[in-house]
Image: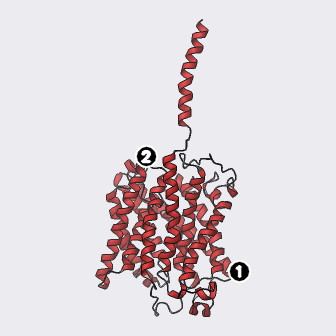
Amino acid sequence: MKRGFSSLAALATAVPVAALAQEAAPKIDSGDTAWMLTSTALVLMMTVPGLALFYGGMVRKMNVLSTVMHSFAACCLVTIVWMIAGYSLAFSDGGAFVGDLGRALLQGLGVESIHANAKTIPESVFMVFQMTFAIITPALIAGAFVDRMKFSAMLWFTGAWSLLVYSPVAHWVWGGGFLASANVLDYAGGTVVHINAGVAGLVLALMIGKRRGYPKEPFTPHNLVLTLLGASLLWVGWFGFNAGSAVAANGAAGMAMAVTQIAAAAAALAWMFIEWAAKGKPSVLGIVSGAIAGLVAVTPASGFVAPSGALVIGLAAGALCWWGSTALKRMLGYDDALDAFGVHGVGGVVGAILTGVFAIEAIGGEGKAGLLDGNAGQVLTQIYGVAVVVAYDAVVTFIIAKVVDMAIGLRVDADTEREGLDLNLHGEVVH
């Protein structure tokens, strides 16, 4: 009899323990999945058509097709590269530097698969969401070299850069690498996307050289309405970029959306008023560039800061990216055609460092406090993260570009550049 009571007691205690274990197991949530499907579509829209229109409107008419082709081709190429090895190198288990090839060719990815970084959505959705980040990053680089780079060279560079730069840096920050272990904060891509793209753009601009006639000849945008439409699509898509990085439909996503909107608006106004004071007129190109600068700068901070912090980040980004796209460029004499470095490089650095100032533990979670929340060391940690990414990106970008240049050449010939890339490289023109 005593043994029977003991068995019943053991069974009674085992049942709730088993139930708790079952509840704790990862489970796909339909609401989170729906939000992440939406976010993925929004981020893809940022590249095509958003970035394509944004950049396409800023170049001369004879190069508009080659410019939009950069974005569309990057979307297609990086999709395949990400499927073959990029995702695995970024987000599979590996060392502190890079992941392994356990998910190469997406082997093992099933309907019920769940990634450790996103336990309430299918891994397939997480994989494609991260793919859209991998797509837009090399597409952003093109803003630095439009009007003068060979299309074939761009393709070779993009494929190699995605594997050798983007995937390792994504692993460092988001895939359990050494920058994550050091507590470098980057919620949605300040270092992984924007600093990475901006620095690579600057290196390519320096290696390829200035456009023929720059800066004496005018390089007037052919259609700023396209640029404004592209910027608007980027702005809307950025809610998927930042709020989607919560990987759930929750309060963190809501706060990320709020601070994203505030920073973008603040930076747009800051750039506009500075330009108005300096040149006497506020331009369409200025206000849309300012909005993009604010979106760039708040990206690393979007899951960690309050609205007041986002306001300061936006104002700082508008002012400093205006300076980076005008005075700094003139002072150093490089030809960053569409200000990939001036907006994304400078804005990414501003946002990454200010994340270390304004991060609040009550918003970002345990261990995510910045200077104003009692953790002054976070600023130094952020600077460390920025320095590592800048150094690695610059060196490897140079090596990749040098190899491509030696193999097939980076720059089009003088006649092609003079007559326009659309007709000579793609056999098409805009009428």
Dot 2: few (<14), some (14–19), or many (≥20) neighbours within 10 Å? Answer: few
Q: Is residue 214 above or below residue 340?
A: below
Q: Position of residue 283 (x, y in %)?
A: 35, 81
Viewed as shown, does residue 7 lie left or right of 52? right
Dot 1: few (<14), some (14–19), or many (≥20) neighbours within 10 Å? Answer: few
How many labels sit on residues? 2
Viewed as shown, does residue 353 lie left or right of 141? left
Q: Which residue is mark 1?
A: 407
Q: Is residue 49 above or below residue 148?
A: above
Q: Which residue is mark 2?
A: 366
Q: Position of residue 280 (x, y in %)?
A: 29, 85
Hey, which quadrant is residue 396 in on the image? bottom right
Depth check, front residue: 141 or 395: 141
What amino acid type is highlighted by mark number 2?
Glu
On residue 256, the disc is none
Depth check, front residue: 194 or 329: 194
Q: Residue at x 61, y 91 (%)?
A: 416
Q: Is residue 376 visible?
A: no
Q: Residue at x 39, y 74 (%)?
A: 288
Q: Position of residue 8 (x, y in %)?
A: 57, 14
What is the quadrant of the N terminus in the image? Answer: top right
Q: How is the image coloured?
A: secondary structure
Q: Position of residue 366 (x, y in %)?
A: 43, 46
Viewed as shown, does residue 127 lie left or right of 215? right
Q: Earlier in the sequence, mark 2 or mark 1?
A: 2
Q: Residue at x 62, y 72 (%)?
A: 158
